Amino acid sequence: MNALRAVVVCLVFVCAAVVSPAAAVTPGWSALPVPPAAVSPVTVSGLAARGPDEAWASGYEHAADGLRPMLYRWDGAAWSRETSFPGAGDPGWFGTAQFAGEEVWFLRDRAGVRELLRRSAAGWSTVALPQTLWTYQDFAAVPGAAWVVGEDDTGVQVLHYDGTRWTRQATPDGVLYVMGITARTATDAWAWADTAAGTTVLRWDGTAWRDAQVPLPPDSNVHAILAEASGRVTIGGSRYTDGTTRTFLTTGNGRAWHTTHPPLDGTPVEGLVRGPDGALWLPVRSDRAFQSKYARVDGARTTFSYGPEREDAIDVRPRALARAGSSLLSFGTVEIYGSKPNLMSERRGGRS
């Protein structure tokens, strides 16, 4: 009887492996070496990937005499420091990185002057902004268009670049401030704004900016909008209710909007991305000093995973995520006991 039971148990395991091979080989997070920044501490602003063989991480170093711009490039095998861009030795900083087709774009400060920096197959080039703003809140770039949003002494500014010239785009009445912007195409962009009535989502349809009529939760703040090629739009943010802050995700499919509240304890969702597995991923604050932590939201189910253990680490913080082919890349900082925060990167999945 014992022998028969052993055979049955073995057959069960074999069948499970055959029926669900993906579960047996589900990859975890692994550390990717990153050349340390010349000066620490550092701030990571963003991460963008165009397939498994090209990704860019942007940010700045905190030098004794001010900020210094910082770019790192992933070539599918290793991270390297990029210093060939114009003004690499000038003071300043980099904001987020975004791919527009095969070009990568950055909003940057170069010795006090804001501009867009882009890299194509032909090399580096800059796009001067048409005017100076008090604040430069965000930017978005897609093939054929780019936007910069902020404010000057006349109020809200939405600046639009069509590849040749800049124009100022009007916002709906009542918009006090545009907090962020993202775009799917040159005729389909999304932004979130402050109004007297609260946060509002705006949409550009190629002709004008209009209220998108998104039913956001009451008293909510939007942190990010993920507009996907499929037409799906996910809006992430937080709201204060019953004495606590709750994270929300509002998703639209072109016909209706649906809001969920994943158990993320009010975690900001600026780093929200759609993973190769179809689920939403974002970095979260870890409860383990020596490991990073990530949340995976798939419908009503939220699960968590940890990065690799890092010896003598007292704070591991992935700051940004990006899909790179069939894998996820993260880029952020790690503080080792006795030193200031420097750079770290991790990957979930393989190279393909």
Image (cartoon, grey):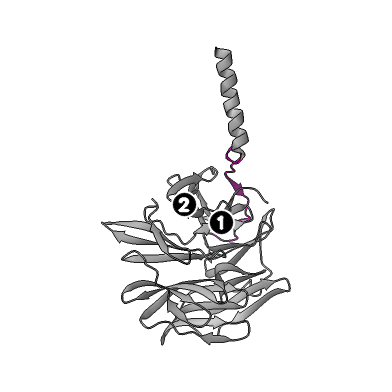
- Start and end of the magenta stretch? 22-40
Q: Which residue is mark 1?
A: 331
**Residue 246 image position (x, y, % from top left):** 35, 56
Look at 42% across and 64% down and name the residue there: 256
Crowd around label 2: few <14 · some 14–19 · many ≥20 (10 Å): many
* 16 vs 178, nearest the viewer: 16
Relative image position of residue 230 (x, y in whole percent): 56, 63
Numbered label attached to residue 265: none
Q: Tell whether 124 sits left or right of 339.
A: right
Q: In the drawing, does residue 223 fall left or right of residue 18?
A: left
Q: Quadrant of residue 153?
A: bottom left
Location of residue 219 in the rendering, given as x and y in whole percent from the top left corner: 31, 66
In the picture of the structure, the residue carrying the numbered disc 2 is 297
Where 341 falls versus 312 (above or below)? below
Q: Let me know if residue 214 appears in the view.
A: yes
Q: In the rendered view, does 125 fall on the left or right side of 315?
A: right
Q: Main secondary structure of the magenta part?
A: loop
* Crowdedness near tag 1: few (<14), some (14–19) or many (≥20) residues, C-alpha within 10 Å: many
